[in-house]
């Protein structure tokens, strides 16, 4: 029989199990799949199982033996029939241009090939006699590939299998990551500079008045990011409200290009993120004992020194919490740059969505997502080390 | 604090801070409010001053098949996800509060993980997983996704409320012979109800405002209000979008009001919730 403590333990387990199970199966497992997708390499094995098996046991010197060519000739038409060839040719074409045409052409005629198969393939296209091509196929007979992760940092695999830099105009991701970090950094600094005096002002108000003012801060906080971005999207149109106001005030003659610029991205992102900065700052400032400043003043410290030596250091936890939170949420932004930014203002998330929805290249989406996750994880670790997990609860879904 | 003491920040400095704060509050609130007059325009263009007053865009919003479907989907998904997230989140919070086992902190961190992971990553991961099991392009998938993202909010809110409960009350009830179910229904639930209700409001807002998960998991038949709005923005900018945005701002305002009322009735509003 179970004792009271055993029953208690069972009870606690039963309370935690439903949500634990849900988070496990509908969040942790999907996250695991995302990581797996970034290295997953099963297209060749799915389309050409026997060829894959033989390639794995081949030593990789020169050209593969005749049975590999024979298996390929037998399996290519089958793969074309059961639609797995499309995925394989797209996958190999991503690694090396021209692979799609090569595979599709061979799949159409391979049924008529007779032994010796190696010569039949090479008669169709001399590339089938190049060792580099077979190196590439052998590499992709393995169930995992480093290719997507390499591409995500502008590296790629050379024909021989070494790691080399991506060619000039295709090397876009390092710049993209730097741009994402830069935009998040600018937004963080702007929020801090604007938010600090606001939080200070709020912290000096009486409880009732402060609560009234906080409501003004909370309304935007509760309004969805999409609605707020939509407002900016509408405001900043060429014939929109902002341009009419500027012309009415006589500040400009011609309408300015406001929408689809970096300025628009900063404006809208600061608008979205400002409450995330002001609330932790306000919290930290409320905890500063005014007696400390009085003591400093009575000892003759001038206002600036009081601020620099006492107020600023004491508000530092709020600065750290707010800045890290704003930065962390900002690097994952998608909706705002997508709606009010131009091509040169897009962040990592835009490319993740692009690879999923337009390119149907899940591997690249997963690799970029994994890098973003690592970046955010590092920031959260710092946040947790500096201010404790408590602040995270304020991070209601943004993006 | 305002006793003209030498330590009090100088008056000009306070005026500057007040002026900055006023400008910042205007910057925060005005852009949201600008969609309201635009939604009542009689014209087709989004210009102020509007050429005349009309309710035609609201009429369109409340009669158009696509917007109706989106409103219906948003409500169905929001209500179901809120119910599921509130139930599961409350149970888990009680379990965490009662338990004192090893790895409790880790478990809390794992349960709160969906709060910390960027929305696009969660949406991408759910898309991969739900495509594999046929849950993509279904309302069930959306409900499940929103439940996972909303439940941590409930856990955190209810846990905060539980920390104010005196455990001696539970011991007293148990010693008087109350079983676990009665203990929960008659003693614990009434004590934590404001926290549970706040959590539910947060959960509904999480689901109702979500665009990212809907962007990856919803087919045209499952478009929610934010998803339909996003599609509208990319196709053709019409005042209907302002009407939809106004409705969404109104709902957000209602939810904010509800959460404020709950916090005040709870008495926790006496303290400072943000410090």
Image: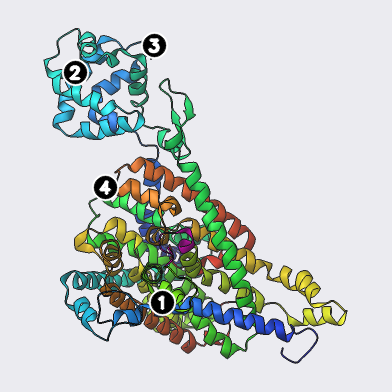
> Neighbour class for label 3 at 10 Å: few (<14), some, many (≥20)?
few
Answer left or right for A324 relative to B152: right
What separation in Å lies between label 4 and label 1 (alpha carbons)?
39 Å
The residue that mark 4 highlights is B132
What separation in Å lies between label 2 and label 3 (alpha carbons)?
21 Å
- The image shows residue A210, relative to residue B163, as above or below, that is below
Tag on residue A61?
3
State the residue lying farthest toward the right.
Answer: A299
What separation in Å lies between label 3 and label 1 (alpha carbons)?
67 Å
> Neighbour class for label 1 at 10 Å: few (<14), some, many (≥20)?
many
Q: Of tags 3 and 1, which is closer to the observer?
A: 1
Colour scheme of the rendered structure: rainbow
Q: Of tags 4 and 1, which is closer to the observer?
A: 1
User: Which secondary structure, mark 2?
Assistant: helix
Task: Point out residue A77 in the picture as x, y percentages from the top left corner.
Answer: 15, 24
The residue that mark 2 highlights is A73
Task: Point out residue A271 in the picture as x, y percentages from the top left corner.
Answer: 48, 70
In reply to whether residue B47 is colored magenta, the answer given is no
State the residue lying farthest toward the left.
Answer: A112
What separation in Å lies between label 3 and label 4 (alpha carbons)?
38 Å
Using the image, name the chain to which the residue with label 2 belongs.
A
Dot 3 and dot 1 residues touching (CB under 8 Å): no
- The image shows residue A116, relative to residue B107, as above or below, that is above
- The image shows residue B18, relative to residue B77, as above or below, that is below
Give the extent of the magenta segment: A255-265
Q: Is residue A203 visible?
A: yes
Query: Residue at the location (11% across, 15% down)?
Result: A112
Q: Quadrant of the N terminus of chain A?
A: bottom left
Using the image, name the chain to which the residue with label 4 belongs.
B
User: Which secondary structure, mark 4?
Assistant: helix
Q: Are marks 3 and 1 on the same chain?
A: no
Observer-nearest of B91 and A305: A305
């Amino acid at each position: 029989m179970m004792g009271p403590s055993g029953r208690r333990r069972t009870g606690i387990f039963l309370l935690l199990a439903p949500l634990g199970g849900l988070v496990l199966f509908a969040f942790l497992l999907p996250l695991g799949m995302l990581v797996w997708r970034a290295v997953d390499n099963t297209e060749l094995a799915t389309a050409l199982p026997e060829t894959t098996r033989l390639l794995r046991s081949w030593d990789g010197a020169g050209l593969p033996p005749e049975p590999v060519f024979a298996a390929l000739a037998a399996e290519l038409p089958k793969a074309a029939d059961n639609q797995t060839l499309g995925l394989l040719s797209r996958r190999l074409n991503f690694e090396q241009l021209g692979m799609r045409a090569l595979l599709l052409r061979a799949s159409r005629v391979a049924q008529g090939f007779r032994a010796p198969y190696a010569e039949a393939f090479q008669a169709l296209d001399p590339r089938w006699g190049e060792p580099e091509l077979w190196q590439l196929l052998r590499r992709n007979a393995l169930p995992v590939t480093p290719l997507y992760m390499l591409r995500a940092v502008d590296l790629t695999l050379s024909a021989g299998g070494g790691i080399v830099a991506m060619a000039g105009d295709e090397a876009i991701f390092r710049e993209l990551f730097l741009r994402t970090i830069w935009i998040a950094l600018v937004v963080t600094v702007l929020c801090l500079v604007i938010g600090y005096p606001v939080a200070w002002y709020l912290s000096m108000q009486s409880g009732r008045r402060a609560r009234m003012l906080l409501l003004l801060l909370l309304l935007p906080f509760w309004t969805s990011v999409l609605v707020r971005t939509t407002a900016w999207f509408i405001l900043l149109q060429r014939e929109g409200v902002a341009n009419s106001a500027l012309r009415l005030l006589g500040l400009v003659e011609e309408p300015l290009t406001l929408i689809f610029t970096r300025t628009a991205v900063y404006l809208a992102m600061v608008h979205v993120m400002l409450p995330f900065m002001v609330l932790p700052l306000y919290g930290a400032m409320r905890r500063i004992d005014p007696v400390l400043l009085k003591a400093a003043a009575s000892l003759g410290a001038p206002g600036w020194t009081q601020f620099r030596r006492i107020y600023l250091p004491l508000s530092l936890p709020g600065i750290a919490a707010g800045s890290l939170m704003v930065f962390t949420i900002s690097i994952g932004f998608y909706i705002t740059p997508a709606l009010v930014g131009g091509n040169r203002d897009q962040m990592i998330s835009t490319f993740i969505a692009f690879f999923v929805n337009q390119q149907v290249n899940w591997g690249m989406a997963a690799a970029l997502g994994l890098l973003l996750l690592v970046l955010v994880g590092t920031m959260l670790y710092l946040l947790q080390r500096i201010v404790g997990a408590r602040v995270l609860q304020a991070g209601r879904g943004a993006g | 604090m305002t006793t003209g003491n030498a330590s009090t920040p100088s008056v000009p400095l306070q005026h500057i801070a007040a002026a900055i704060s006023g400008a910042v509050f205007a910057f925060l609130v005005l852009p949201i409010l600008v969609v309201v007059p635009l939604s009542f325009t009689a014209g087709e263009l989004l210009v102020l001053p509007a050429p005349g007053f009309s309710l035609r865009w609201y009429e369109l919003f409340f009669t158009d098949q696509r917007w109706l479907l989106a409103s219906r989907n948003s409500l169905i998904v929001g209500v179901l996800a809120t119910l599921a997230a509130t139930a599961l989140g409350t149970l888990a919070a009680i379990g965490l509060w009662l338990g004192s086992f090893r790895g409790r902190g880790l478990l809390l961190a794992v349960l709160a993980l969906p709060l910390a992971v960027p929305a696009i990553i969660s949406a991408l991961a759910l898309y991969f997983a739900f495509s594999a099991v046929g849950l993509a392009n279904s309302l069930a998938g959306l409900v499940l996704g929103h439940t996972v993202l909303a439940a941590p909010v409930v856990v955190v809110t209810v846990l905060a409320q539980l920390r104010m409960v005196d455990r001696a009350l539970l011991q007293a009830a148990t010693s008087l012979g109350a079983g676990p179910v009665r203990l929960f229904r008659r003693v614990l639930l009434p004590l934590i109800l404001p926290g549970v209700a706040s959590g539910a409001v947060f959960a509904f807002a999480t689901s109702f405002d979500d665009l990212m998960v809907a962007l990856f998991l919803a087919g045209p038949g499952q478009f929610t209000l934010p998803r339909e709005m996003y599609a509208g923005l990319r196709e053709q900018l019409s005042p209907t979008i302002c009407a939809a945005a106004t409705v969404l701002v109104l709902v957000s305002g209602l939810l904010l009001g509800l959460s404020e009322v709950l916090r005040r009735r709870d008495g926790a509003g006496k303290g400072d919730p943000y410090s």
